[in-house]
Structure formats: structure tokens, C-alpha cells
Amino acid sequence: MGLMPAAMIVTLLGPLVVQQAQAAIALDRTRVIFDGSQNSVSLNISNNNKQLPYLAQGWIEDEKGNKINSPLTVLPPVQRVEPGKPSQVKIQSLPVAKQLPQDRETVFYFNLREIPPKSSKPNTLQIALQTRIKLFYRPIAIAINDNSTPPQEQLTLTRQGDQYMVNNPTPYYVTLVDGSSKKQGPSINGFEPLMVPPQGTMPLTVSVASIGSSPVLTYVNDYGGRPQLSFSCSGNRCTVMPEKRKQ
């Protein structure tokens, strides 16, 4: 099967026909948690195109966007997925993974690119779509019990002028994707998502005046869900009000 070597090929002679605008290769999740007690994690992929086989190319990047093959690698790096069929991609750890910090998470990025078959039609624009998701290496020492209180509830806010600083005392990355001035309230205009590193501090992009004295922040959990954190403020410091849970 002749396949495109690059993400996009354009034939410039004559009128263009756009082909395969929607993603064919689908991934079963929006983020990956790599358990440090395991040697690998398998991701399910599928070819949603019922007529054509596609190649699926996977690789990992570090926090700065550099392509890497260690301490984590993708197997197989390229595979053919038949029309309408499922498959798997494995992220494998190498022995040097044990040299990563063991008291906090390390973030990587998993990339999955679809490579369509070469079109037999002349003057065709083909687009190879790519998915890029966060990959968190979580050491054994900081494994999370599903029945425990979410670590994100340890976040605090500190007011500095007309701005809130988000303080993350946990060993985990916390991704905040939305903010409002009340529970189930409308999103605050100008809120920009941010990923606060372990034991790190980052500012919210919206003003104290816009998000108010009882801010509500939405974070992304391990499963791609989006729970909310309701804060109660006293003076210049805000803490999370714990949610009531079923016993």
C-alpha cells in the first residue's frame, strides 16, 4: 500500500479535491497515566474508516516537545490498521525510567498520527490528522487510591492584587480548564487553561473581580472527567470546600 510520508500532501496542478477530512484513526482516551509499578500500558486505537486501511504512527515527546525514545517508547512505532478494525499501541518503559523523579509526576506527550493510503485520484488534497495527549509517569511512591480524597482538593488560591495565584502542594500535575464565579455558573471570559506543576504556583489569567470571592475551578481528572472545585476565601487565601461523598 502506497502511503504518504508526511502529514500533508498537496498536488498543485488543477482543481483540488479535499479527501478524508475527518480523523480515521481514533484513540480511546484523552490522557495517559503510566503507573510506575508497571512495565507498559496499552492504548486501544481503531480505524473508523470502513473502506481503507491506514497506518498509525506513534511516538513520545518530552515536556519541551522533543521527540524521544527513552525512558518511554512506543511499540510498534508504525502499524497498519485494517478498515473498521481495532488495534493496540503499547507504551513501554525502559530500565532508565527508574531514574525519573520518584517523589512527583513527570509529564510527556503521546502522539498518534494517521497516514492515509495514497489517493488514486488526481489533484487531491490529503490531510493526515494527528492526536497529541498528555502522558504522566506516576511513580509507585505516589500511587493514588481511587477511594481517597482527590489530591486536587489540596489546591489553594492566594490573592495578589487583582489576581489569584494557584498553589499546588501535591506531587501531581493539575490541569485547570475552566473557571466561574459560582457552581454551575457560566465560564469567565478570558480564562485560559493552565497546567500547574507539582509543588508549583501559577497565576489565573482572569481577574479577582471577574471570578469573584467564591471562585469555582474545573480540573481534568485521570479519566478525562471534569470535576469542579469550589473555593471559600478568607482574607487573601482560598481553600477548597470538600464535596460530600456517599459512604
Image (tube, rainbow, N blue to C red):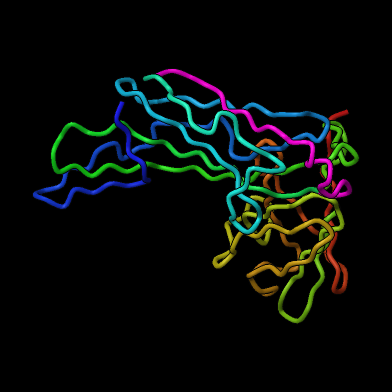
Q: Is residue 232 visible?
A: no
Residue beneath the point at 71% across and 57% down:
216
Quick check: 117 left or right of 64? left
Would you identify the image quadrant in which residue 65 lies?
bottom right
Where residue 196 appears, as percent x and y from the top left, is 73, 59
Q: Tell me: residue 46, above or below residue 138.
A: above
**Quarter holding the N terminus?**
top left
Give the image quarter of residue 200: bottom right
User: Residue 155 placed where, x, y %?
Assistant: 82, 57
Tell whether position 93 is magenta. Answer: yes
Residue at point 31% right, 40% down? 21
Where 71 sits versus 186, above or below?
Answer: above
Q: Position of residue 41 (x, y in %)?
A: 69, 29
Is the C terminus in the top left, top right, bottom left or bottom right quadrant?
Answer: top right
Q: Is residue 131 magenta?
A: no
Number of numbered discs visible in the structure rendering: 0
Q: Position of residue 81 (x, y in %)?
A: 43, 23
Left or right: 14 in relation to 216 = left
Q: Is residue 246 visible?
A: yes
Residue closest to the far left: 14
For the residue pair 131 and 148, the one nearer the viewer reads as: 131
Q: Which residues are magenta?
A: 84-104
Residue at the spot x=91%, y=40% of the render? 141
Q: 148 or 1, which lies in front?
A: 1
